Image (cartoon, rainbow, N blue to C red):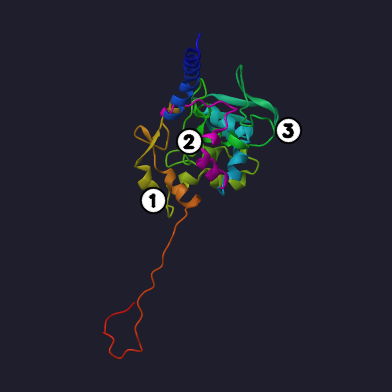
Amino acid sequence: MNKITLLTIAMVSLALFVLPNTISMFVGQHTFEAGVQCQKCHVAEYCELDEATTIDVHKRAANNTNYTTFLSVGGIKYYPSNSTISTINNNKWIWNGAWDSGNGTWENGSEHKLVSLDFNGDGEIDGAELCHLCHNASLFGIEGGHAVTVRVCDDDRCHGNRNHSYLGDAADLFANPANVTYVVTAGYNLSRGNVHQSFYLNLSNQSSTYPAGYPFGHASGNAYGIALSRGHWTCIACHSDVGTDVTLNPHPVYNHSDADAPQRRYW
């Protein structure tokens, strides 16, 4: 077998190995495995996220297994008196374990869940682990594989919207409920007699480019048609940094040294 034949076989073998992943990257057929480092392809997005002022609070939320379990089962309310999560599908998930120590699981009949995004087990949310909070489809009621979805700020189970604010009834899942209640109901509050209400509602009646899907068999409260609305832009407008280059042009001044200067209005 000559060198050209061997080289041809090698190139074809390499193409068969690389091509599926290459096509997947550019046509959007992502898979979302726990160990994937998203920043390898999404450098700019990762850097922007890492520098955001809200990154620490989102890391704490992502590291709260009670909250991530609440997301994954479609929770709509938490009853602290009996440690029960009620879901949109009328299921009841009951905590079985030592609450203070975090040792235990959420149970629904024979099912047991305690969803953790801390894949490397170091006790923190770091690297690409945070990406899963907003993009892992299994937290959005879509099971099977590791498909990617988009969860935006005014999602039903994040900061709420004009239709739903489920976390308002589940703030006790967090360590300091009093300090998070107004945060997890921000979208709902914006739609109710708030100074930003008209801005938020106007954007809520416009479609984004993100498919709304049908999480847990129900329409999202922040959907507009078949897509998510642009309501989350209201949040981004105040909670993101925007760099601008501004040139100030000084206004004309009256030439007091010239007695013959034309008379006109100055400002």
Q: Which residue is mark 2?
A: 151
Within 10 Å of disc 2 (Cα), the crowding (few <14, some 14-19, many 20+) is: many
Q: Among all residues in the image, which is located at the extreme bottom?
A: 259
The amino acid type, in three-letter code, at marker 3 is: Ser
The amino acid type, in three-letter code, at marker 1 is: Phe
Determine the image quadrant of residue 82.
Answer: top right
Q: What residue is at 41 percent from the left and 64 percent from the top?
A: 247
Determine the image quadrant of residue 60.
Answer: top right
Q: Is residue 96 visible?
A: no
Q: CA distance from mark 3 to mark 2?
A: 30 Å
In this rendering, would 246 be left or right of 206? Answer: right
Q: CA distance from mark 1 to mark 3?
A: 43 Å
Q: Among all residues in the image, which is located at the extreme top?
A: 1
Q: Nearer the viewer, residue 214 or 47?
A: 47
Q: Is residue 200 above or below residue 223?
A: below
Q: Is residue 266 above or below residue 98?
A: below
The amino acid type, in three-letter code, at marker 2 is: Arg
Mark drawn on residue 101 = 3
Secondary element at image label 2: loop
Q: Answer yes or no: do the residues labelled 3 and 2 have beta carbons within 8 Å?
A: no
The answer to whether residue 81 is magenta is no
The answer to whether residue 47 is magenta is yes
Q: Which residue is mark 1?
A: 199
Secondary element at image label 3: loop
Q: Nearer the viewer, residue 136 or 191?
A: 136
Q: CA distance from mark 1 to mark 2?
A: 20 Å
Within 10 Å of disc 3 (Cα), the crowding (few <14, some 14-19, many 20+) is: few
Q: Answer yes or no: do the residues labelled 1 and 3 have beta carbons within 8 Å?
A: no
Q: What residue is at 54 percent from the left and 40 percent from the top?
A: 46
Secondary element at image label 1: helix
Q: Is residue 201 above or below residue 223?
A: below
Magenta span of residues: 27-51
